[in-house]
Amino acid sequence: MIQALVLLLLTGNGATATSTNPRLKLSFHNLRMRHGLHTYELERSCCFDSLLLDEERGRLFMGGKNYLASLSLDNISKQDKKIYWPAPVEWREECNWAGKDINAECMNFVKILHLFNRTHLYVCGTGAFHPICGFVEVGQRVEDSVFKLDLKSLEDGKGKSPYDPHHMAASVLAGEELYSGVATDLMGRDFTIFRSLGSRPSIRTEQHDSRWLNEPKFVDVFWIPESENPDDDKIFFFFRETAVEAGQGLGKHTFARIGQICRNDMGGQRSLVNKWTTFLKARLVCAVPGSDGSDTHFDQLRDVFLLPTRDKRNPLLYAVFTTSSTVFKGSAVCVYHMSDIRRAFLGPFAHKEGTNYQWVSYQGRVPYPRPGMCPSKTFGTFSSTKDFPDDVIQFARNHPLMYNSVLPHGQRPIFLQTNVGYTFTRIAVDRVAAADGHYDVLFVGTDIGTVLKVVSVPKDSWQNMEELLLEELQVFKDSSTVTSMQISSKRQQLYLGSRTSISQLPLHRCGIYGKACAECCLARDPYCAWDGTSCTRYMHNTKRRFRRQDVRNGDPNTFCFGDPQRSSVPEKKLYGVEGSSTFLECLPKSLQAQVVWTYQKSSSAPRKEKIQGSWNKSQIFYKWTLLHCDPSYSQLQEELLI
């Protein structure tokens, strides 16, 4: 007698932003053997925290301990070029005499990598606690094989590179000027935002003033234009620091910050000489609103990614946060609009007053020109900050902090994970053109060597988004922390650095979603579409009428079967003969789906006895059927007994 068993694949379309299950989870071995993962290791080096993507030359430049390397963007495992750049012996000995570890710290750790012009890079290293910078010739064309450090151009790296390899620093090269957030002393106590190189004078933040910078940890920095007039261009620094405005007597609190300065700031004439006169900072909030009115804050800013838009003045800023809370552990991603950032800097200044010296919104007269505004014809008549009145300079010195915070889009994180055994460390974002709109795909690195691939999709509107965790990928074989990340939309590749190695991975693996239209559609991956025969890369400009893709809803019934009334759950039927054995699938291809088997004795009989993956090891029903599911196997074995 032939019996029928029906498999129902229940998809996870209702997954929330805090879902811990990805649709696919791939190991390092699987990625390397089947899905194009390339790796690069450099003997006697480590700490590949500095990566620089050069699309024009097709190279990935890397900085590590005592080495610079140039790798092919197509395959980082091939055609590498190396420069050995150690610290001089006398510097290493001096470093060792100062009590530092001669093998772990008294080396030259390359921390700064920037494209300087069409033929050279600008590079800086710690130099065994003796920061040093120089120029590397890389040629002008792709076919140029030159990769050479100019030893005659080496210069002091103070104010550009950190002394200590463990200290965080951030910098950006704007034109020929280098803007750095860094500690400028051996002990790591004098933190500054510093301008060097170029023709304008070197300028820094006020020294030893906790109102300006208070034990900061610099994360990233970007050059963003304010208007069509380059005199309005600003540099934005992202960092975290000990908050001066936190509640008294409550201990140290870390706040995430965004700071701004004008590129054309020349310092003051009589006060703040060679100091920033346009420096302002505001708190960067990433928090989950609580039902009781209290928010759960993520204040440990870890990384920021600038996603360009059609308007170069208004990019999106994606930021990764963790929390130092002892109550719970978690990580979050918040996204910020430049309009909200600018609004905070145009709002009230923070001011300390009253008998208890509480921080309040400053209600007095703000001098003209407003502190933080750049001297230009766009917003005034001043041609230089040296022409600013004394009251403007004095106000700027005493009021660097804004009262209003910068809130994220939607007033909450767009993606968060709690109690998952890892924390977020880095982020890169790719804007993907799909059949039903543009989607931002997030690649989030973790401290256990994995990358999470996440896509934002609208629930009922493009203002109300949900995050789908598509993939969890093990990109380093030793589970090293992801410390650097670069993305190439042009080549569709992701490049990642850790303490031990560098990995390269394609942004998509469409073929892994299955060999049916429904499986491809249910994946909801904006990179992928059903082309009539297989799940392949979706090309926005390709006109093929049988392409099928539905990122927004993941509805295969409409897009694959053309029948919106059809059951939304795909079915698979197996027929068994009494006295024989067969295998039933236990684990679905998607970890956000559920497999359910039902038994039907004949075509006219009702379906009975739902059997799910969470059932006990053995279960008897109808007296003649024994079903067995061993968790150590990936399949469910059914034995039909007489």
Image (cartoon, rainbow, N blue to C red):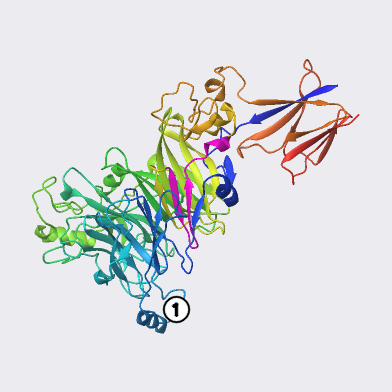
Q: Can you tell which quarter of the image residue 136 is in?
A: bottom left
Q: Is residue 50 above or below residue 519?
A: below
Q: Would you say residue 322 sits in the magenta stretch?
A: no
Could you tell me residue 209's position as x and y percent? Answer: 28, 68
Q: Is residue 148 above or below residue 609?
A: below
Could you tell me residue 193's position as x and y percent? Answer: 27, 63
Residue lying furthest right in this view?
642
- How many numbered marks have been drawn onto this rendered protein structure? 1
Task: Tell me the magenta residue range.
Answer: 492-513
Residue at position x 22%, y 59% from top?
A: 177
Q: Is residue 55 above or below residue 113?
A: above
Q: Can you tell which quarter of the image residue 431 is in?
A: top left
Q: Is residue 170 visible?
A: no
Q: Is residue 274 visible?
A: yes
Q: Can you tell which quarter of the image residue 185 is in?
A: bottom left
Left or right of residue 622: residue 43: left
Crowd rating for badge 1 (residues with CA inside 10 Å; few <14, some 14–19, many 20+):
some
Left or right of residue 620: residue 614: left
Left or right of residue 561: residue 464: left
Could you tell me residue 223's position as x and y percent? Answer: 26, 51
To which residue does mark 1 refer? 102
Left or right of residue 267: residue 169: right
Quarter occupied by the C terminus = top right
Type of the residue with mark 1: Ile
Residue at position x 49%, y 27% from top?
A: 549
Could you say which is closer to the camera, residue 215 or residue 469?
Answer: 469
Could you say which is closer to the camera, residue 144 or residue 250?
Answer: 144
Could you say which is closer to the camera, residue 291 or residue 119?
Answer: 119
